[in-house]
Amino acid sequence: MGSSRGESPLGKLKRMVLGGARNPHDPQLFHKLSLIAFFAWVGLGADGLSSSCYGPEEAFLSLQGHVYLSIFVALASAVTIFIISSSYSQIVELFPTGGGGYLVASKLLSPSLGMISGCALMIDYVLTISLSIASGSDALFSFLPPHLYSFKLVFAISGVLVLTLLNLRGIKESVIPLVPIFILFLLTHAFAIVYAIATHVPEVGTVIDATAADVQTTSAEIGIIGMLLLILRAYSMGAGTFTGIEAVSNGIPILREPKVQTAKKTMRLMAVSLAFMVIGLMIGYLLYNVGHQQGKTLNAIFLEKMTYNWGTVGYAFVLITLLSEAILLFVAAQTGFLDGPRVLSNMALDRWFPSRFAILSDRFVTQNGIMLMGAAAFVLMIASQGSVKLMVVLYSINVFITFLLSQLGMVRHWWAEKATSPGWEKKIIINGIGLILTAFILVTVAYLKFEEGGWITIFITGSLVCFALIIRRHYDHAQLRLERLDGLIRDNLLKDADFSNPKCLPQQKEECTPEFDPKAKTAVILVNGFNGLGLHTILNVLKLGDIRNFFFVEVGLIDAGNFKGLEEFEKLKSHINDELGHYVTFMQKQGFYAEGRSDIGIDGVDETCALVNKIIEAHPDAEVYGGQLVLPKETFFSKLPYNQTTFAVQRRLEEQQVPFRILPIQLG
């Protein structure tokens, strides 16, 4: 895909930092970029596993000293993990191309509810990045001397920047370096949990008796209803445990074929590992009588009590285990960078956000989306001063908006398909239970956390929803004008335009294929599909002089919508060639020489200029034309949804001394 010869210093720096461009025509491209289940578990599952660093702790502390009730909370949490995981496995089967909660709500409920789900997910992924990095920074700096604590915020901001850079390089490059850290976390925590339980096997009877006594005491103090409400409150306060489960359904496009099987395998790995961590850690807290201590997490207290007589080995084990927690929290931020831009690109393809967020970089990542997520996390980190407490409050609500809408959509789907879908009863039960659980958690958390800052995330999400509505309204109005233009041009083109050609008699036009006329002018016209815009541009070009030779240039952009496999690539190529074929056939029938040139790529400006330059080399006197829509009232927000590619091509070609003329087309 091009050479570095003649590359600008800025281009060389970009290539050195982000890596060289990838070739979209490489048949092994998707295999090189896709992830097997294990790597997907690392890249997408770290968010869920890292929540075991704070989710179980929140639930355990919410029991207000009735610690033996934590067994019920742990079991309920594990059941919820498997229910949500099973329901998302059904979503993966129903939507094998990905999309997650956004696509489910859009297709099964309504586009507007899907947009709300998508907006909530994007805010959630920004918070995933900020909260994970801030939590990891807190854990890491707890090992360092107190006088270095003032650098924590700088360190956290640097973490955001580094992860943004890694993701701009590409998917695998950002996942593979994290594998050793992920494995270290699993091994250390699995050992701690197994050791804690194994060494307390003789005390199982005592634990059962103590649990029964705690149930009796609690029910006597606050009643059975009060005890159930206490358990449910603790269960809800540990809601952060369930975040990250939806990541696989959003990340299907980056998975190795067969994608559905890979996704389901990844989902099982996530569910089993997370349930094991939640139950194991809460039992560990219980067995070692862990309680709140200022400046320490419950995991740290649990590990210290477990290894208090191990000497130096114990200190080293605690240090390594807690360090792996801190680093895994950085790994968890990766989920926000993997899935946040993907949700944004899907919404951009549906015109809820500017289409530029669906465009891929030459490293085949949604560069604009990654930069937006990184910038938003950067701002949030500064605004909150890296406060984990505040971000946990903000984080608690949004993901369950998406969970709720996804479960509701699936329940509605199975009910509508009950006559044609075998085994629908089992499926609707799974999604129905998921709907009840997620609705309960959402309402409870929103009520308990609203005054503590929950209103902030609701306000931010609401603002994003309003922005999406404005963008969609603008696109809809522009589409209506374009359709009107298409109709006017197609209905009146032959009547209003003079396409007479002495070389072809009217009765011969069906068979006549004109030859290139070296004495006549040559026009190179940039098009984007066979539509009113392209036809209007042709009319304007014909008014400029005796132009008999036409070259039509069209570039198919590889975006998040068609970057799903070789089959989609071939469809894109075929579509582009068909569109150009319409122009060529149309102009030939009018007696003009016409030829089409096409390519596909990720940078419309680069690919277009390359095609134009090849034509100019063969026909130096050719002039380049491009139609540009002109809105009735142009403002910053009216221009935001568009890529302004024509102007960018004009600047690039004029730098190369190639004449380029923009022909404005008023959208009245």
Image (tube, rainbow, N blue to C red):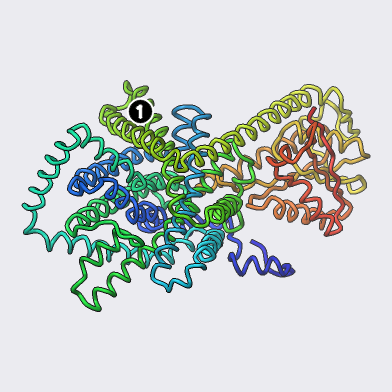
Regarding residue 365, the answer to whether it shows in the image is no
* The N terminus lies in quadrant: bottom right
Left or right of residue 378: residue 432 = left
Query: Which residue is found at the position 89% from the left and 49% from the top?
Result: 518
Query: Which residue is found at the position 41% from the left and 36% from the top?
Result: 446
Location of residue 523 (image quadrant)? top right
Q: Where does residue 92 sit, x and y in percent of width and height? A: 38, 40
Given residues 92 and 468, the one toward you in this image is 468
Location of residue 350 (image quadrant)? top right
Q: Name the residue under label 1.
A: 411
Q: What residue type is labelled 1?
A: Val
Q: Where does residue 629 sit, x and y in percent of width and height? A: 78, 36
Left or right of residue 659: residue 389 = left
Q: Residues within 10 Å of mark 1 (few under 14, many from 20)?
A: many
Q: Where does residue 110 sit, x and y in percent of width and height? A: 49, 27
Q: Residue furthest front?
A: 221
Instruction: Identify the secondary structure beneath mark 1.
Output: helix
Left or right of residue 528: residue 214 = left
* The C terminus lies in quadrant: top right
Given residues 535 and 346, the one toward you in this image is 346
Regarding residue 131, the answer to whether it shows in the image is yes
